[in-house]
Image: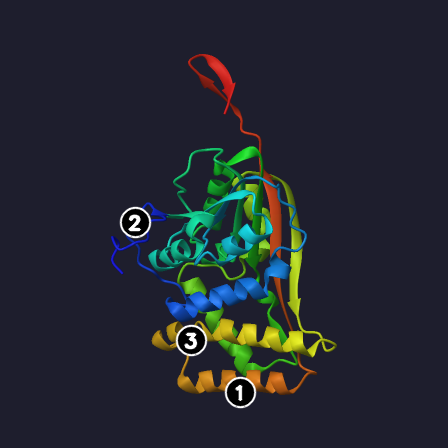
Amino acid sequence: MSSEDTHPALVSKITLAEDYIHGFGAAEEQRLRAQAAFLADVVFHDWVLPSSGRLLEIGCGVGAELELISQRWPGLELTGIELSETHAAAAGHALGGQATVVRGDAHQLPFADDSFDIAITIWVLEHARSPVDVMREAMRVVHPDGRLIFTEVDNSTFRFQPELPAIAGWWELFCHRQQEAGGDPYVGRRLADLALAAGGCEIEALELSVHSRREDLSRRTQLLNYLEELLLSGAAHLLEFGDAASSTLAELRADFEKAHCDSSIQFQYHAVRLTCRPSPRPPVSVGGLTSIL
């Protein structure tokens, strides 16, 4: 798709070299939508949003989270911004009139100060070259009484017990490749410090847990399928850059098969949800007069 061949719902076109470990296309779009639906009870647990107002999702991907938000809080006016042309086009097509999709960079949001009541990220800051700048921009475009919700990964918490060597090794390669691309797969554990540096206040962090339960084998199977799809989504990049070999991929699949067959093998993966507000803006002098912006 050329930069001019975009959906009418998209605003603001930029040139982009897409470098995303999970890849693009129909399979990735399907994976993202399935992931959003599968993790919805974890991601949206205890969310309390107003019945009306303006919500911005930064890094909205293919629009999967915005679609779920529109179903849960239909009174909100939704906007998503996405850097990837491929994902932004998919979001525009999928959401239609449910949300406005803007193509642009989260590090320099194309919105005026105080444009939104709520700004959110979901699994986005791990891919950002400067998470603190993204958070600072989010705080700029949210009005002083608004709210910010950042839900992000901490890949250091991912583990199987007992350890499955091929899965552990692949995960290490997966995280290393993401870091080589400028991301931070461990950003969840830094969210509080980043929010403080970005100018946030009333900062609260909550650990979100995705883990196996022997008493719920159906859910356990679903979690294993989700994790396997997540790791396999990086296979093309890892094989292309020589980080992994086809034999390593086969061993990864064998480890997941072992986990499926042995319910005594436990696993866990944690994320962090941080909520905060923008700090009050300092007074500035305009033409000899002091005003609050």
For the residue pair 213 and 187, the one nearer the viewer reads as: 213
On the image, numbered disc 1 is attached to which residue? 254
On the image, numbered disc 2 is attached to which residue? 14
Q: Position of residue 263 (x, y in %)?
A: 68, 83
Mark 1 falls on what kind of element? helix
For the residue pair 93 and 139, the one nearer the viewer reads as: 93
Is mark 1 in CB contact (under 8 Å) with mark 2?
A: no
Number of the label disc, if any, that sits on residue 235: 3
Q: Position of residue 145 (x, y in %)?
A: 59, 33
Q: Position of residue 154 (x, y in %)?
A: 57, 61
Q: Residues within 10 Å of mark 3 (few under 14, many from 20)?
A: many
Q: Is residue 116 above or below residue 287?
A: below
Residue at 25%, 58% (x, y): give it.
2
Q: Is residue 274 above or below residue 235?
A: above
Mark 3 falls on what kind of element? helix
Q: Earlier in the sequence, mark 1 or mark 3?
A: 3
Q: Position of residue 282 (x, y in %)?
A: 53, 26
